[in-house]
């Protein structure tokens, strides 16, 4: 009898354990902390689209035009032949990068000096044969250790393209430059150029600190190229070096990773730049360059992210693990630091179509309501009723919410024009109709709307029923 009772107890315990184990396994799986998005490959990201959300609040506008008073006074009192254009203060407020030009310099060419926050000139950064271009893109690294800028050979600017005209090679009035260049084709189809430059300049480049009278070393000779390349220097204005050496490519935009490890940039071949600029100019548009996104590390290693061109500036994720780029009505996300980087394409055309239909219906309803209100005091009831019927006739016929409308009937259906990535799981995108014309009165910016993607990892769901 004892053995029979013990056997029954054992069977009951085993049955209870068999029933409890799957639930415990599910519970443990559910309680397991999710990996941060920085560790999730781009191709394994999931997203949810939210339309017409409030604009993101950007509190990190670092590169606003700030003029340090001490630096401005130094230029006003001691540098009469040089005009201060910008004074970019480092994020830690310890350094000031002076962006300026000399009388006689071309309008598109600038020079750089480094100051202390107290207005003491620390170093001259650009030598006489180096011209800084695109001053609006100059940016400090978030850790204040480096400054990135675009530069090329000075004094060879083509008025049509804003870049070097080959016909003007060797015609610099102030210097005699002999350049020997060796062009090497890389695996990704780019060209790397090793350049040896011997420069004899008629200008005395020895700099003097106007406050103390102490002599400063002249700026170091750094190789320059015939198209705009990305350069960096340290917080003291030294160690100037090119990060890119792709002769024939123009780098016109770049942004630092939040951890200051690399730059996301846009670049385009010189021929495409010239053709696009000429066509837009002939049509009366302001020139907006289009380029292909690239990653450029501080050691000079470079990776082409995509073969598609875009004019939308790429953005970094807050954890510096990924880069997002927009192409018309699609967003692509690229891994920046993975050993085997992946990418994910997020097509948003259908989502934007459905969102624009709702937005347009709302606009028409508001316009109809405003029209009826304005005419209510002057129209008879019959006239008011007729106008209401006409307004309703213009509204689209009721369709299933999942049915895609005709894009040609939607005024608010427009491409992505801006990106902002403020939180790891929130990627904002702005759509709108933008037409920037040479005649400002003809420019149009309308239907500017913000949307966002809520990002998450693709987690496999566990079916409790099957487990039980």
Image (cartoon, rainbow, N blue to C red):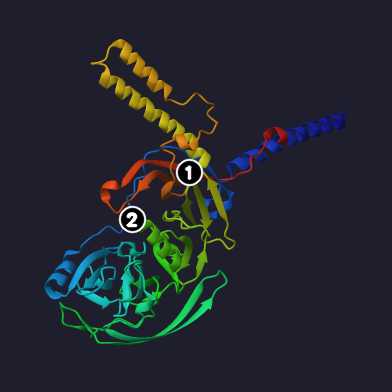
Give neighbour class at mark 1: few <14, some 14-19, many 20+ (Cα, 10 Å): some
Quarter of the image with the C terminus in it: top right
Q: Quadrant of residue 411?
A: top left
Taking the image as shown, residue 100 lies to the left or right of residue 184, namely left
Looking at the rendered structure, the secondary structure element under dot 2 is loop
Residue in front for this viewpoint, 369 or 337: 369
Q: Position of residue 400 (x, y in %)?
A: 54, 26
Q: Position of residue 422 (x, y in %)?
A: 41, 49
> Mark 2 near mark 1, Cβ–Cβ under 8 Å?
no
**Looking at the picture, does residue 331 appear above or below residue 107?**
above
Q: Which residue in the structure is indicated by mark 1?
A: 453
Query: Residue 286 has which mark?
Result: 2
Taking the image as shown, residue 226 lies to the left or right of residue 209, namely right
Q: Position of residue 373 (x, y in %)?
A: 28, 20
Q: Residue at x 43, y 46 (%)?
A: 429
Taking the image as shown, residue 350 lies to the left or right of residue 215, namely right
Quarter of the image with the N terminus in it: top right
């Amino acid at each position: 009898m004892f053995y029979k009772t013990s056997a029954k107890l054992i069977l009951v315990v085993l049955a209870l354990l068999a029933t409890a184990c799957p639930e415990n396994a599910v519970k443990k799986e559910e309680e397991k902390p999710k990996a941060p998005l920085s560790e999730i490959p781009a191709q394994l990201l999931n997203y949810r689209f939210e339309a017409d959300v409030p604009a993101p609040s950007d509190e990190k506008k670092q590169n606003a035009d700030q003029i340090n008073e001490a630096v401005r006074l130094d230029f006003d009192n001691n540098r009469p032949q040089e005009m201060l254009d910008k004074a970019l203060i480092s994020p830690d407020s310890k350094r000031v990068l002076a962006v300026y030009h000399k009388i006689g310099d071309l309008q598109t060419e600038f020079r750089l000096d480094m100051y202390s926050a107290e207005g003491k000139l620390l170093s001259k950064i650009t030598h006489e044969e180096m011209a800084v271009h695109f001053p609006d893109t100059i940016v400090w690294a978030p850790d204040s250790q480096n400054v990135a800028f675009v530069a090329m050979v000075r004094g060879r600017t083509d008025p049509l393209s804003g870049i070097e005209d080959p016909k003007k090679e060797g015609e610099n009035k102030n210097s005699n430059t002999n350049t020997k260049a060796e062009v090497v084709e890389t695996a990704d189809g780019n060209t790397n150029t090793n350049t040896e430059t011997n420069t004899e300049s008629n200008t005395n480049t020895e700099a003097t600190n106007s406050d103390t009278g102490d002599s400063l070393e002249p700026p170091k000779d750094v190789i320059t190229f015939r198209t705009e390349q990305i350069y960096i220097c340290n917080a003291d204005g030294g160690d100037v070096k090119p990060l890119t050496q792709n002769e024939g490519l123009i780098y016109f935009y770049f942004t630092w990773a939040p951890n200051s490890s690399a730059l996301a940039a846009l670049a385009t071949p010189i021929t495409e730049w010239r053709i696009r600029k000429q066509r837009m100019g002939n049509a009366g548009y302001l020139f907006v360059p289009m380029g292909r996104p690239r990653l450029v590390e501080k050691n000079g290693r470079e990776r082409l992210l995509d073969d598609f061109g875009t004019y939308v500036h790429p953005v970094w994720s807050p954890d510096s693990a990924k880069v997002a780029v927009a192409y018309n009505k699609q967003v692509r996300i690229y891994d920046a630091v993975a050993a085997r980087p992946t990418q994910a394409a997020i097509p948003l055309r259908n989502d934007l179509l459905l969102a624009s239909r709702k937005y347009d219906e709302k606009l028409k309803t508001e316009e109809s309501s405003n029209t009826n209100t304005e005419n209510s005091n002057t129209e008879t009831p019959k006239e008011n009723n007729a106008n209401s019927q006409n307004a309703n006739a213009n509204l689209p016929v009721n369709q299933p919410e999942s049915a895609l409308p005709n894009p040609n009937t939607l005024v608010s259906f427009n491409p992505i024009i801006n990106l902002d990535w403020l939180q790891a799981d929130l990627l904002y995108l702005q759509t709108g109709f933008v037409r920037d014309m040479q005649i400002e009165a003809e420019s149009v910016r309308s239907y500017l709307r913000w949307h966002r993607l809520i990002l998450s990892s693709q987690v496999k769901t566990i079916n409790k029923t099957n487990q039980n």
